[in-house]
Image (cartoon, helix red, strand yellow):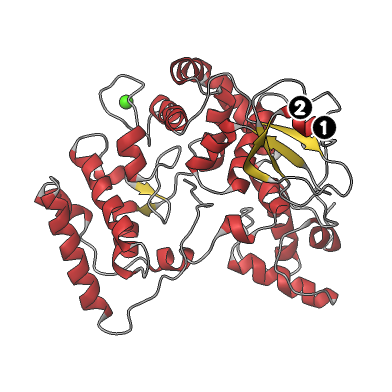
């Protein structure tokens, strides 16, 4: 469902006239609808005592990380050594919970942990937007999917009404996903489980509830116990064969097309798989199984599912991808991005502190450094600009 990475929706526009009155009237309508659905008037009033839209939500709702980042940038940030290291430590700390969730729902514990690691950095970054405010903004000011946001908002308040969470815990992404594994309220209502046995489904504070709910979600999305997720492969030079997650074929057919495992072992036996070549035949190839689709259902972007699947492999002890991405300017990890920011600060291009998050200010600073070097201005945080500024 994606915290910082969430699939976003373009086309959010301010109404041209009477903004404040329109917003107040819309919020009043949301309160009434919430009360009609069983939310107490007092709770509706507390949750929706808001006078103006959340402007940051409006800004962020027009960006789409999965679709605007190069795949090698996206993967470099989501599956960096730090997230692998942290994940292995967290898997050890929560080993019994993960084992129990795997046993009950059949979902590979490494995949559960990978979702946790990517959605919230293992619970540490759950988002700090007040979900009712964010969703009311999208429902009342958004130009698209207003019914969806409205229904998610009422769903969020319903969770508080039934006692799963306190209102104060509804802090999450700008698009209303929240908790350690960033569920939208409707998914929370359908898939969340109480796994620590306290009678409440608390995906914000309870690691067992969050991990088991993720496993339940994946199971309900079609996960098949014991089946693989993906295999990194190599395709022959100039490959022009089938490509696509759903164009599944037996592994023998892929072998017949000259596809080999990237680690050199034979493809062997397994369920049918589809071929993904996210950067074309010169880059890494992936045979993806039905379980990959279950991950895709969690946040419908192939790049997202690829990041989860590869992080899960790394957590299970597999090495980084064998085939390099076909670029002469690979992406930077979060640590590398913070180092780049330090260099930009030291050279006067950027003010503030290095947090590894490349926002508009960092992009403008990179573009300024590129301009100084006589390069095309891209604002992109890659290895080349990092090295040109003295990074190693
Ligand atoms: Ca619980």
Between the C-alphas of marks 2 and 1, the distance is 6 Å
Q: Residues within 10 Å of mark 1 (few under 14, many from 20)?
A: few
Q: Which residue is mark 2?
A: 252
Q: Position of residue 15 (x, y in %)?
A: 32, 79
Q: Nearer the viewer, residue 289 or 47?
A: 289
Q: Is residue 95 above or below residue 49?
A: above
Q: Residue at x 27, y 37 (%)?
A: 165
In the image, is 14 to the left or to the right of 257? left
Outermost residue to the right: 237
In the image, is 189 to the left or to the right of 182? left
Q: Position of residue 341 (x, y in %)?
A: 69, 59
Q: Secondary structure at mark 2?
A: helix
Q: Residue at x 72, y 70 (%)?
A: 378
Q: Residue at x 68, y 46 (%)?
A: 75
Q: Is residue 27 above or below residue 121?
A: below
Q: Quadrant of residue 373?
A: bottom right
Q: Which residue is mark 1?
A: 256
The answer to whether residue 155 of the structure is visible from this angle is yes
Q: Quadrant of residue 14?
A: bottom left
Q: Are marks 2 and 1 in contact (CB under 8 Å)?
A: yes
Q: Residue at x 80, y 63 (%)?
A: 385
Ligand 1: which quarter? top left
Q: Nearer the viewer, residue 338 or 295?
A: 295
Q: Secondary structure at mark 1?
A: helix
In the image, is 227 to the left or to the right of 13? right
Q: Nearer the viewer, residue 28 or 302?
A: 302
The answer to whether residue 319 of the structure is visible from this angle is no
Q: Residues within 10 Å of mark 2 (few under 14, many from 20)?
A: some
In the image, is 123 to the left or to the right of 85? left
Q: Position of residue 233 (x, y in %)?
A: 78, 35
Q: Position of residue 369 (x, y in %)?
A: 77, 71
């Amino acid at each position: 469902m994606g915290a910082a990475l969430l699939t976003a929706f373009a086309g959010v526009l301010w109404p041209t006239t009477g903004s404040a009155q329109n917003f107040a009237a819309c919020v009043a309508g949301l309160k009434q609808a919430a009360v009609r659905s069983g939310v107490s008037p007092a709770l509706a009033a507390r949750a929706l005592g808001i006078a103006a839209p959340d402007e940051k939500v409006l800004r962020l709702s027009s960006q789409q990380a999965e679709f605007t980042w190069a795949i090698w940038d996206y993967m470099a940030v989501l599956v960096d050594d730090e997230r692998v290291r942290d994940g292995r430590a967290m898997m050890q700390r929560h080993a019994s919970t993960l084992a129990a969730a795997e046993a009950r729902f059949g979902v590979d514990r490494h995949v559960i942990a990978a979702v946790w690691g990517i959605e919230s950095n293992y619970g540490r970054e759950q988002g700090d937007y007040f979900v009712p405010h964010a969703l009311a903004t999208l429902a009342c000011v958004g130009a698209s999917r207003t019914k969806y946001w409205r229904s998610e908002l009422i769903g969020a308040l319903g969770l508080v009404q039934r006692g799963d969470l306190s209102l104060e815990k509804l802090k999450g992404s700008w698009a209303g996903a929240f908790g350690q594994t960033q569920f939208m309220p409707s998914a929370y209502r359908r898939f969340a489980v109480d796994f620590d046995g306290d009678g409440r489904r608390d995906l914000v504070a309870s690691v067992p509830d969050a991990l088991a709910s993720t496993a339940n979600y994946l199971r309900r999305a079609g996960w098949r116990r014991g089946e693989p997720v993906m295999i990194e492969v190599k395709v022959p030079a100039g490959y022009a064969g089938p490509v696509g997650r759903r164009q599944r074929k037996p592994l023998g057919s892929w072998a017949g097309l000259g596809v080999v495992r990237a680690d050199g072992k034979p493809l062997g036996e397994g369920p049918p798989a589809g071929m993904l070549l996210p950067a074309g035949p010169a880059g890494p190839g992936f045979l993806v199984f039905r379980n990959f689709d279950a991950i895709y259902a969690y946040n419908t972007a192939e790049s997202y599912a690829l990041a989860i699947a590869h992080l899960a492999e790394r957590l299970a002890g597999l090495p980084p991808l064998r085939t390099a991405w076909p670029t002469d300017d690979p992406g930077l990890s979060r640590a590398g991005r913070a180092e780049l920011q330090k260099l930009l600060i030291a050279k006067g291009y950027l003010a503030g502190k290095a947090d590894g998050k490349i926002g508009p200010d960092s992009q403008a600073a990179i573009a300024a450094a590129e301009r100084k070097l006589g390069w095309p201005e891209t604002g992109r945080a890659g290895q080349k600009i990092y090295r040109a500024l003295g990074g190693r």
